């Protein structure tokens, strides 16, 4: 015979109070990627076969540079959120989960910073 109440049996197994924010953030980044992707790809495709100087000329324009930086930041945030869902769903060991979540955050944020830095370097003429 158990004297546990229903509450005691499920205590600690409930919501982490973060799911809604994660879901909304993933949807907002997906929606933001639609116009950002189009505005990033159009000048990129125009200068794709024209050579190095054409790419430098395209991204030295402040509007194209800001769109490219915005695209990289939003795209890699969206990718990080998606990979976080996969990691949480398929990794069950607490230690492995912690390590992969930290690696996920560092890798995709690193790529976003590297992309933004590369475009900023082109835009500023360095």
Image (cartoon, rainbow, N blue to C red):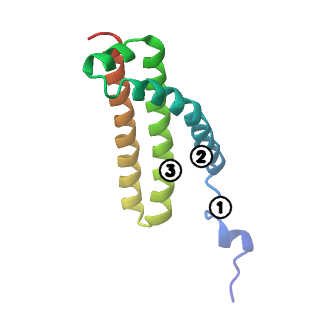
Q: Position of residue 78 (x, y in %)?
A: 51, 42
The C terminus lies in quadrant: top left
The answer to whether residue 121 shows anywhere in this view is: no
Number of dots carrying numbers: 3
Residue at image location 37% in from the left, 12% down from the top: 60
Query: Of discs 3 and 1, which sits in the foreground?
Result: 3
Residue at the spot of label 2: 22
CB under 8 Å between callouts 1 and 2? no
Spatial separation of the CA atoms under disc 3 and disc 1: 22 Å
Query: Of discs 2 and 3, which sits in the foreground?
Result: 3
Left or right of 59, for residue 41? right
Residue at image location 66% in from the left, 69% down from the top: 10
Q: Is residue 125 above or below residue 20?
A: above
Mark 1 or 2, nearer chain start: 1
**Element type where label 2 sits in the image:** helix
Residue at the spot of label 3: 82
Left or right of 102, for residue 125? left
Residue sitting nearer the eye, 36 or 19: 36
The N terminus lies in quadrant: bottom right
Spatial separation of the CA atoms under disc 1 and disc 2: 16 Å
Residue at the spot of label 1: 14
Q: Is residue 6 above or below residue 72?
A: below
Residue at image location 41% in from the left, 66% down from the top: 93
Q: Position of residue 49 (x, y in %)?
A: 31, 28
Q: Is residue 108 above or below residue 95?
A: above
Mark 3 or 1, nearer chain start: 1
Mark 2 or 3, nearer chain start: 2
Mark 1 nearby-residue class (10 Å; few <14, some 14–19, many ≥20) = few
Q: Is residue 15 above or below residue 44?
A: below
């Amino acid at each position: 015979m158990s004297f546990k109440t229903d509450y005691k049996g499920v205590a600690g197994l409930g919501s982490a109070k973060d799911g809604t924010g994660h879901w909304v953030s993933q949807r907002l980044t997906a929606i933001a990627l639609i116009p950002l992707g189009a505005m990033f790809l159009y000048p990129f495709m125009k200068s794709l076969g024209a050579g190095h100087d054409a790419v430098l000329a395209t991204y030295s324009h402040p509007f194209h540079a800001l769109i490219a930086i915005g695209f990289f930041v939003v795209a890699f945030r969206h990718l990080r959120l998606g990979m976080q869902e996969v990691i949480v769903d398929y990794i069950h060991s607490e230690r492995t989960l912690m390590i992969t979540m930290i690696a996920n955050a560092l890798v995709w944020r690193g790529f976003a910073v590297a992309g933004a830095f590369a475009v900023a370097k082109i835009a500023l003429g360095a």
